[in-house]
Amino acid sequence: MDDRDMGSDLEKVLLSQEQIEERLTELAAEIDADYAGREILLVGVLRGAVMVMADLSRKLHSRVQMDWMAISSYGSGTKSSGVVRILKDLDTDLTGRDVLIVEDIIDSGLTLSWLVGNLRSRGPASVEIATLLRKPDAAKVPVDVRYVGFDIPPEFVVGYGLDYAEQYRHLPFVGTLAPHVYGG
Ligand code: XMP
Ligand code: MG
C-alpha cells in the first residue's frame, strides 16, 4: 500500500501508481496516432475524471483543448439508472469538433451512453471515449469505447479520482475498500 493506508479502510491495491502511469502513456500514444494533425477537445466528466484528465492530457502531443461537464445520474445506491441531469454544461460549441470524452470508470455504461447521445446531437465531427477503468457490465450496453485503460472485476473501487462518500479521491492508486467501510 502506501503510508496513506487510511486506517486500513482499503482492502488491497488493484492498480498501482506505476501501472496507471504506464498504461496512460500507452493510451496517449494511441490517441496521438489516431488524431494526427487534428485538435482534440477533451471533455472531462466531473468529478471522478479529474486525475485521468490531468495525467492523460499531459502525455498528449496533439493540440488539445479541455472542457468539463458535471452530470448526475439518478439511481439507487451505487447503481445508475441512465436517467441523467446536467449539473454543469460545457462552455464550448461542439460544432465540427473532435470530442474525446475522458472518464474514470464505466460500470453499467448507462451514464455514458446518455452522454454520447447528448454530445452527438450538438454537431461534432466525432465523439469517442477514453476511460481508465471498465467493469464487465459495460459489455451489455452498445457503447463503443475506443480507449480503455484496464478491464477490472465488478468490485467497488476508490482512489485516483474515484470516491466512496466523497472520500479517497486523492489516492494516487486504485484500490478496493475493506467491507467494514461500506457495512459489508
Ligand atoms: P454507469 O453504471 O452509468 O456508472 O456506467 C458510472 C458511474 O458510476 C460510478 N461508479 C463508481 N464509482 N467506484 C466509484 O467510486 C466504483 O467502483 C464505481 N462504479 C461505478 C461512477 O461515478 C461512474 O462515473
Ligand atoms: Mg462517485
Image: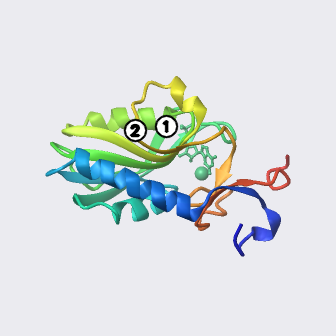
Q: Position of residue 9 (x, y in %)?
A: 79, 62
Please name whichever residue, 4 or 2, is drawn nearer the observer in this view of the structure: 2
Identify the mark at residue 93; answer none if there is no mark. none
> Label 2 is placed on what type of residue?
Leu
- The answer to the question of whether label 2 and label 1 lie on touching residues, with beta carbons closer than 8 A, is yes
Amino acid type for the residue under numbered disc 1:
Thr
123 relative to 50, above or below = above
Q: Residue at x 75, y 69 (%)?
A: 5
| Camera sees residue 81 | no
Question: Residue 82: where, in percent of width, then height?
Answer: 52, 32
Q: Position of residue 184 (x, y in %)?
A: 85, 46
Q: Report the residue at 86% width, 54% height from top.
A: 180
Q: Within 10 angstroms of label 2, few (less than 14), some, or many (20 or more) residues?
A: some
Number of numbered tags placed on the structure image: 2
Q: Going by the image, does 147 lie left or right of 137? A: left
Residue 129 position (above or below residue 44): above
For disc 1, the marked residue is 111
- The quadrant in which the N terminus is found is bottom right
- Answer with the quarter of the image where residue 127 lies: top left
- Name the residue located 20 percent from the left edge and 37 percent from the top edge: 123
144 w.r.t. 169: above or below = above
Q: Helix or strand or loop: what does disc 2 sit on? A: helix
The foreground one among 27 and 123 is: 27
Q: Residues within 10 Å of mark 1 (few under 14, many from 20)?
A: many
Residue 115 marker: 2
Depth order, front residue of 86/172: 172
The answer to whether any part of residue 172 appears in the image is yes
Q: CA distance from mark 2 to mark 1?
A: 6 Å
Label 1: state its secondary structure: helix
> Where residue 157 sits in the image (x, y, percent)?
66, 50
Q: Is residue 114 above or below residue 59?
A: above
Residue at (83% x, 50% y) in the render: 179
